[in-house]
C-alpha cells in the first residue's frame, strides 16, 4: 500500500476530486479526514470508505474561515495522531463569474475567499502540523486555467487559480529544507458537478471540448491517481511542480478533428 501509516486531510471531500481522492487514499492505507461544508456529501464519502474497511472521519469546515481551518487540522491530529498529507482541494466556480465588466465584486470576493484564501489558511494551520510530523506533502488544486486563458469568461476563478499556482511554488521553495513538499495539481476540464453546472448547455460543453486533444472531459478518479502520486513517497523529489493532468489541453495549438 502506497500511503500506509500516513494521515491525509482532504478539503472539498464531499464530491468530485475530493471524494475520489479520499476513497483512493484510504484504499492505499491512509487515515483520511474528509472536510467539506456539505454534510450529507462528506458523510457519504466517509461511509463509502468505511464500507471498504478504510479509516476515515469527517469534519464540517468552511475553508474560507480561519477558525474552521485551525479546527480541521487539530481534528486530524487529535483523531489520527499526525498529519502527513494536506490536500487543499475545495473550490467554487460561481455561475455569475464573468468578464471584468460583468463580474460583481461580491462574486470576486467570494471566489477569492474560498479558492485562494482557503488554500492559504489550509497551509497556515496545516504546515505547523506537517512540521510536527517530521515533514509531508501539500497538494493544492489549481487548474489548467492558471496556465491558459479561456474565452468563456470566469475571471475571478481564473485569477484565483493563478494565485494558487504561484503561491504553491513559493511554499515549495520556503519549506524545501523542512521535508515539506508542495505541488499544484492542474486538472483539465472535468465531468464533475463544478464544471457541468457552469457549462450548462451542450453548446458550451462542445466549445470547451474542441480544445481537448483527447476529445473528452476528465474524470475525478483520474485526478485522484495524480494526487496519490504527489501524496506518496514516490514523488519524493517533486516539489513546486505544476502537475498538469488535462487530456493534452495545455499542449495543443490546434486539436485533431
Ligand atoms: P466539486 O464541486 O465536485 O467539489 C468541490 C467541493 O468543494 C464540494 O464538495 C463543495 O461542497 C466543496 N466546497 C465548496 N466551498 C467550500 C468551502 N468554503 N469550504 C469547504 N468545502 C467547500 O468540484 P471538483 O471538480 O471536484 O473540484 C475540486 C477542485 O478542482 C476545485 O478546487 C476546482 O476548482 C478544481 N478544478 C476543477 C476542474 C473541473 O473541471 N471540474 C478543473 C480544474 C480544477
Image (cartoon, rainbow, N blue to C red):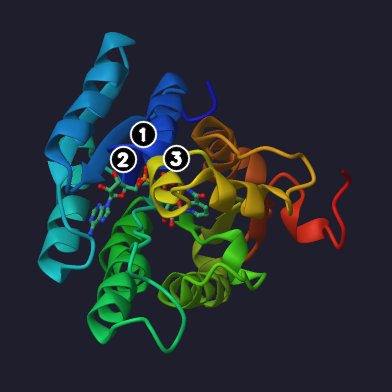
Identify the mark at residue 13; answer none if there is no mark: 2
Task: Depth check: give the residue in front, 124 or 39.
Answer: 39
Whether the residues at callouts 1 and 3 have beta carbons within 8 Å, the answer is no
**Left or right: 5, with 45 as reference point:** right
**Residue 31's spot in the image, x, y percent?**
32, 30
Q: Residue at x 65, y 46 (%)?
A: 235
The yes-or-no answer for disc 3 within 8 Å of ligand 1 is yes
Where disc 3 sits, the SS reads loop
Quarter residue 166 falls in? bottom right
Q: Which residue is mark 3?
A: 192
| Mark 1 within 8 Å of ligand 1, using the beta carbon | yes
Q: Are marks 2 and 1 in contact (CB under 8 Å)?
A: yes
Is 30 drawn above or below residue 59 in the view shown?
Answer: above
The residues tagged by marks 2 and 1 sit, at their Cα atoms, a distance apart of 4 Å
Residue 175 in view in this figure: yes
Percent x, y of residue 175: 50, 70
Q: Residues within 10 Å of mark 3 (few under 14, many from 20)?
A: some
Q: Secondary structure at mark 1?
A: helix
Amino acid at each position: 500500500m502506497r500511503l500506509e501509516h500516513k494521515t491525509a486531510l482532504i478539503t472539498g471531500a464531499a464530491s468530485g476530486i475530493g471524494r475520489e481522492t479520499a476513497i483512493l487514499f484510504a484504499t492505499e492505507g491512509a487515515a483520511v479526514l474528509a472536510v467539506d461544508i456539505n454534510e450529507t456529501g462528506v458523510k457519504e464519502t466517509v461511509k463509502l470508505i468505511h464500507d471498504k474497511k478504510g479509516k476515515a472521519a469527517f469534519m464540517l469546515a468552511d475553508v474560507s474561515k480561519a477558525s474552521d481551518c485551525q479546527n480541521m487540522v487539530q481534528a486530524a491530529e487529535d483523531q489520527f495522531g499526525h498529519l502527513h498529507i494536506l490536500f487543499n482541494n475545495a473550490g467554487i466556480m460561481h455561475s455569475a463569474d464573468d468578464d471584468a465588466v460583468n463580474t460583481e465584486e461580491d462574486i470576486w470576493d467570494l471566489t477569492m475567499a474560498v479558492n485562494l484564501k482557503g488554500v492559504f489558511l489550509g497551509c497556515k494551520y496545516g504546515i505547523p502540523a506537517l512540521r510536527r510530523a517530521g515533514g509531508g506533502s501539500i497538494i493544492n488544486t489549481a487548474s489548467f486555467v492558471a496556465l491558459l486563458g479561456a474565452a468563456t469568461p470566469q475571471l475571478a476563478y481564473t485569477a484565483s487559480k493563478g494565485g494558487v499556482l504561484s503561491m504553491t511554488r513559493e511554499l515549495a521553495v520556503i519549506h524545501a529544507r523542512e521535508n515539506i513538499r508542495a505541488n499544484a495539481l492542474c486538472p483539465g476540464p472535468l465531468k464533475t458537478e463544478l464544471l457541468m453546472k457552469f457549462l450548462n448547455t451542450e453548446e458550451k460543453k462542445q466549445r470547451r471540448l474542441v480544445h481537448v486533444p483527447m476529445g473528452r472531459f476528465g474524470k475525478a478518479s483520474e485526478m485522484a491517481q495524480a494526487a496519490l502520486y504527489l501524496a506518496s513517497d514516490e514523488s519524493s523529489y517533486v516539489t513546486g511542480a505544476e502537475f498538469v493532468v488535462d487530456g493534452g489541453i495545455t499542449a495543443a495549438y490546434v486539436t485533431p478533428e
